[in-house]
Structures are given as structure tokens and as C-alpha cells.
Image (cartoon, rainbow, N blue to C red):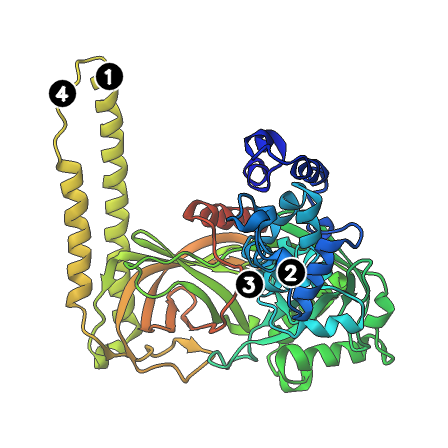
Amino acid sequence: MAVCARLCGVGPARGCRRRGAAREQRRGAADSEPDTDTDPEEAGGGGVTEDEEAAERIEGGRPLPPSVEAGPAGRAPLSLLELPPELLVQIFGSLPGTDLPSLARVCTTFRRILRTDTIWRRRCREEYGVCENLRKLEITGVSCRDVYAKLLHRYRHILGLWQPDIGPYGGLLNVVVDGLFIIGWMYLPPHDPHVDDPMRFKPLFRIHLMERKCATVECMYGHKGPHNGHIQIVKKDEFSTKCNQTDHHRMSGGRQEEFRTWLREEWGRTLEDIFHEHMQELILMKFIYTSQYDNCLTYRRIYLPPSSPDDLIQPGLFKGTYGSHGLEIVMLSFHGKKAKGTKITGDPNIPAGQQTVEIDLAHPLQLPDIENLHDFSELSRIVLEVQEQVRREEQEHEQQQQQEEEHSQQAASQPASPLGGEGAEGEETAAGAEGTTQDKAPASQPFVLPMGVISRNEDYPRTCRICFYGTGLIAGHGFTSPERTPGVFVLFDDDRFGFIWLELKSFSLYSRIKVSFQNAQAPSREAFDEMLKNIQSLAT
């Protein structure tokens, strides 16, 4: 702000200007009126003056009088105040909208220039991607500054990806700017078992500017159209929604009609089409549980996993098959020599937020030939051998750590000695060995599920790139007696992978969610790891 004050010729640097004319001094004093409001909604205000009339001529495309286009006596301008208003509009429009309130506090002239809608139209477009013809707003009496300050800027903290707190089931909410609306879209997996189909989505709420006073929040749940709702931003990474008219969620046919409608939307079938009794119980349980959250929900922010050139494939969100539980959303992320699959949606056995699979990238598996691959016992033998190898390596690593701790304690009481590069060499060798193993892996190899392994989707790829040893999390109902059991991670291509659960003799197929989510990148690797830890602790 001090820099702006010096440029416009007011404040501490006023004495540095030319002192020749008292008229210039009086003008500087008049323009030094402070403005203490820092809200973008207040950036630009005051009565109609010559400066504002000039700004309006800019907006309407009318030429400015020659007196506004040059400094006094035809010399080069010495301050921003002497620049033509249309140039100030261009300069101010290139600044972030959050900086404009501070700029408006410099002087009344800046504040008046900031009333020009061209500035705020540009900020709406560049910061929030609003490509609508904002000139149409003039019909409703709403300005671009109103849209920016009362809608986009006010609700900017809820843009991005969120996980609703719906017990073990979770979910995926994407809040986006859609034209002159902010809409919360709930993303749903395709109907089981069509894992390669695109995601489905439905609106849960929307926010828009009906009049100049404030934005309107509407609940979109139910089948009776938009109705009154409320949003409370608890903190930066958490907000809640509340419906003020829950009668709009009810159907005239009662709970039975609501259940049949929900079943068609959620599963794409009727209860009579589902012959598995256990699956019927799980579906009914989910309907009863989730319908309790139709009036109030809390959401917590989630980030997309950061990527690295060394990653096996591009990390991101996938939809996968989970037996009688149907399709669920899993986030695949890479952490050095480990890859993790974290549930974004879950079920009563393994709730959302838990780490469903973990892949050991340091232990690739060489599958038997296609004839022996049909034999489940042969695959099981290979996996259990690697499991025993991993167990021995972990024990050796623990013993080595204990020895290093003892050695460091002894060395603390002795003079320091030069350190060798053995540790760095070891890491380089291990990394080199891993790279060599992956380089030697064939581009593709035949793949078929062993006899006895159950798959919800028989249309899985018949070739794969590479396989790794991994573990999968299984548990009883209510997440009782959880344990990690051995399995096989199968990479098919850049967008599909699978996991064979040896303990369950079942196969899960995962397919990438091909949606470009905005405002979902983690600010840092540490922020992403902290997010993973938080959603897992909440699930536990």
C-alpha cells in the first residue's frame, strides 16, 4: 500500500513531488482520503465524480477527453493519478482480486476507478473461469463486482474435492463454478459391475446471486426441485450443509417408493433382480443409514495425490469392484517403494478412509506360464514365498536399526570420525536393482485368473505389464478383526489394474476415473500425507 501511495502522490512520499503549484497540493490532499474496508465487495464506491464518469465512458466504449490522456503541461506522468483512466483499468484488472481492496484504500480516485465492471469481469474470468456473458447481469441489476465479492470470493474456500462424513460409506463431492452458479456435484460409481463405464453425478446444492444483497443457497436433494438450504464454512478444510425444507425430500408413496427410487439410481435395478440374500441385506442397510444424512452433512477436503516421474503409473482416483458391496472409489498414491490404495467410498467391512491395498514395488512377481497360472496353488506358492522373504527383510531391517542406534549412542561419547558413503551406496544399489527388475519385465505377458478365483467382472484384460507383491485389508462387519493378507497387484495398462485377494479367492478390477478435477491439487507432499492420515484416523 505504501508503494501505491508513493506512486499516486499521497502519503509519506507527497513531499517528493513537484512543489510548484498549490493546486496540485490541494488535489493530493483530497485524494488521500483513506478507506479501511478490505472486502472486495467494498472495493470501489462513493459518489459520481469526473473520475467515475470517465470510468463509465471506458465501460461504454466512449472516447475520453484529451485532458484526461496526458499529464499537466504535456509532460510525462509522475504518478499513477496522472495516467489515463482506461490505462488504470487495464493495470488494476491484471491484479488479483484479493489485492484490490487494499488498492481502494489508497485514495478515493482509485476507489472510483475500481467501480468499473470491466475490472471485475476480468477477475471473474481469470480467477474462476466464468466465461458467461456477464453483461447480461445488467438486466437483473447485479454487477460483476457483486458476483466476484458476494459469490465467488465469499465461497472460494469450498471449491475442490470433499469427502462427506456418512459413516463407513463416505463419498466424493466436487464443488465447482458452473456459469453464474457454484454447484456441489456428488460423484457416484457406475452401476455394478461395469467398472469401465463413466462416473455418474448428481447435484446436492447450488449457490447463486438472485439479487444484490447476498447469495442464495439451495438444496438440490430429492425430486421436488431446488429449495432453501444453508452452508456453514466451519474452517478452511471443512464445511457443512443443511436443508431447511426436508419435506421436499419425501415422496408421496412413502419410504417404499423412496427405497425403490434410490435402488434404481444407486444400483440400476430392482430388489427382485438381486438374488443374493446377503447383497440384499447390504443394500437395505446402506439405504437406511445414508437416508439419515439427507438434511445435514459435513464435508472434509481431500486432495489428488501428487505425481512424480518415477511413479509406476499416473496416480489418481479409480473405481473398483468389491464383491457384494458393489463399486467403490479408491485413491492410488505412490510413496517411494510403496503404493497405497485408500478408500474414498467404503462399506461396513472396510470403511472409507482406510487403506484397502498396499503394493510393495521392491518385490515384483514373476507369474508362471499361462498353463500353470490356471493353478491357484501354484500362484499361492509364489506369493507366500515372497511374503516370507519380505518378513525376513523386515526383521533384518529392524535388527540393523537397533545396531545403528547402539552404535550412535556409543559414538556420541567418542570423538567424531569421517563418515563413509556405504549408506548412500546401499540405497543406490537398491534403487538400481529395482529399476533393473522393472526394465527386464516384458512389455506385456498373458494373464488369466486362476481357477476358483471369483471376479464380479469377467471382462478383465488378458494381458498385463507387470505384477507386484502386495497386501489387502480384510475385516468383519463393523471393521472387526482387521488384518492385512497377501495378494497380487496386477498392472494392465496406464488406466487399469487389479488385485487378487488370496485369502478371499477373489479379484478386484480397478479403472481410472477420467475427470479433470479443478482446485484439487495438494499444496505440498506434506499436506497430502497429512490429509491421508486425517481421513484414516476419522475412519478408525
Mark sitting earlier along the chain (4/3):
3
Badge 2 amino acid: Trp
Q: Earlier in the sequence, mark 2 or mark 3?
A: 2
Residue 126 bears which disc, if any?
Answer: 3
**Residue 391 vs residue 199, the one in the foreground:** 199
Which numbered dot is residue 120? 2
First in sequence: mark 4 or mark 2?
Answer: 2
Q: Residue 417 carries which label?
A: 4
Mark 2, secondary structure of its residue: helix
Mark 4 or 3: in front is: 3
Q: Position of residue 416 (x, y in %)?
A: 17, 18
Helix, strand or loop at mark 1: helix
Q: How far apart are marks 4 and 3 (CA)?
A: 58 Å
Q: Depth check: 418 or 76 in front?
A: 76
Disc 1 versus disc 3: nearer the observer: 3
- Taking the image as shown, residue 421 lies to the left or right of residue 141, namely left
Residue 10 in the image: x percent, y percent? 63, 36
Residue 133 sits above or below residue 98 on the image? below
Judging from the image, what secondary structure is the residue with disc 4 in? Answer: loop
Q: Mark 1 points at which residue?
A: 412
- Please state which of residues 106 and 232 is positioned toward the viewer in this rendering: 106
**Dot 4 amino acid type:** Ser
